[in-house]
Amino acid sequence: MEAFTSDTTPCIPFVLLHQEPSKAISERMQPSCSQPFLDIQQAYSDAKGGDFWCSFACFTATVLQSSWLTASVQVKGGNIISILEEDWQGNVGTGIVIDYGDAVVMPGLIDVHAHLDDPGREEWEGFPSGTRAAAAGGLTTLVDMPLNSFPSTVSEKTFELKIQAAEKRIYVDVGFWGGLVPENAFNRSALDGLLKAGVLGLKARKFLLSLHSFMCPSGINDFPMTNAGHIKEGLSVLAKYKRPLLVHAEIEQGLEGILELEDSAVDPRSYSTYLKTRPASWEEVAIRELLTVTNGTRTGGPAEGAHLHVVHLSDARSSLELIKEAKRSGDSITVETCTHYLAFSAEEIQDGDTRFKCAPPIRDAANKETLWEALMGGHIDLLSSDHSPTVPELKRLSDGNFLKAWGGISSLQFVLPVTWTYGRKYGITLEQLASWWSEKPAKLAGLNLKGAVAIGNHADIVVWEPEVEFILNDTHPVYIKHPSISAYMGSRLSGKVLATFVRGNLVYKEGQHAPAACGVPILAR
């Protein structure tokens, strides 16, 4: 696949992973799309490049031992080349200085679970609107799921279509998971082709930075569900590449008399009706089946080097206990949960408010408390949005039918203030926020030059004010498309994003978006 060039947008079209910083990479990461200071439009018209200093309260997990300090960070050619803690004012030379005062500067957030619906369903979201929303929310990297676009990303050919759709249309960096489905699970050459093309891993319905798979029907016809045999084959191939397999862990068990959907007494507008159609036992059964094959990922096992990641865990009880036991046994396994499971509970959801429908579903308040305990205790490894928007008609907002509405919550642009706002009750720290949203997602996806403010890393940075409160409404700059379907509409949140930098390029500044799409597709190599 050849890189493209552009006279008007001199950005690097592809970031190749698994490489250490080098002179060659530094030269490729030359001119940025903006002079990252001043008014954003003027900065782009001047286009003087990304050689500048920032002074701020800076967090870096590696260079400064997870400490907070007042510091200056030097950015050049898209990378962080220096961090000065003491007397930085006398050492910045003649470079441009952007002083953010007491604002918090952290590594840009990385969302490893987003459905951007491109190509094929751009009316649902699309690369331009989704990545602009991400930038407004402090996210600097997304990993796009292989389904909800059309076609689904399950082959080298369909992955090529995905890359073509992303070129010159993304405002933050985007990586891709590939799909593990029955048609490719036992075809090693097909999986090899997909992985060599650059997906970060696989997803099964059971992820393309890695493969992603589903164990229950996905609602997308060209992304069928998988079983333990498919998962075992996927892990054996992924072991060679040392990339992860992401799994949507639900197995449909039948309703066993709990609910007859054709019963006239059933109220499809009631959230409790929908909750009964996807009980927590579906997650538990799926994870039990998964764990029959994940022992192969242990040291010395046939799939050593592969890694299994359970996406969007909702059940904080039996399912989580199974994952904890697998970790203790040495299985290479991690788990994420999502902001909507931490922010909402079933008891709060009003009849007919289908904005809250997702799968697995939002469960009861006691379950939410247990999820928070597990996250704070380190048993849940990281957070994601599972951003899955659609057009308002498919959310059935007019009739409020939970049984027919599209399941998915529009959320990637809110994850920073939502996590911070709801987490303060539990005493979360900025260090934890950076771990859940930057460091650990980068590790999962193999993004070696992202996830921390550290010398040699990409200058992916979010600047924000934790104490500033605001109410989300349809005029807020984070709303790019379909604000009416957001479950967060009307929420009072803390944490205002001031600026977002991607590889030293200013892509968002207090309601203004960069006019040029400077994000790049990320390919694994």
Image: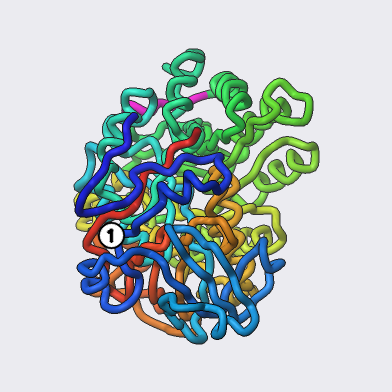
* Left or right, 322 with reference to 493: right
Q: Is residue 446 visible?
A: yes
Estimate the x, y position of residue 474 in percent, counting from the top left. Answer: 24, 71
Estimate the x, y position of residue 311 in percent, counting from the top left. Answer: 53, 44
In the displayed structure, 303 sits above or below 421; it is above
Estimate the x, y position of residue 328 in percent, counting from the top left. Answer: 79, 42
Between 357 and 373, which is closer to the camera in this rendering?
373
Is residue 224 on the magenta stretch? yes
* Left or right, 190 with reference to 353: right
- SS at circle 1: helix
Residue at (55% x, 33% y) in the render: 245
Our reading of the magenta stretch's main secondary structure is loop
Residue at (24% x, 58% y) in the render: 516
Estimate the x, y position of residue 504 in percent, counting from the top left. Answer: 41, 62
Q: Quadrant of residue 397?
A: bottom left
Residue at (65% x, 81% y) in the render: 86
Magenta highlight range: 221-226
Residue underneath mark 1: 485
Quadrant of the image containing the N terminus: top left
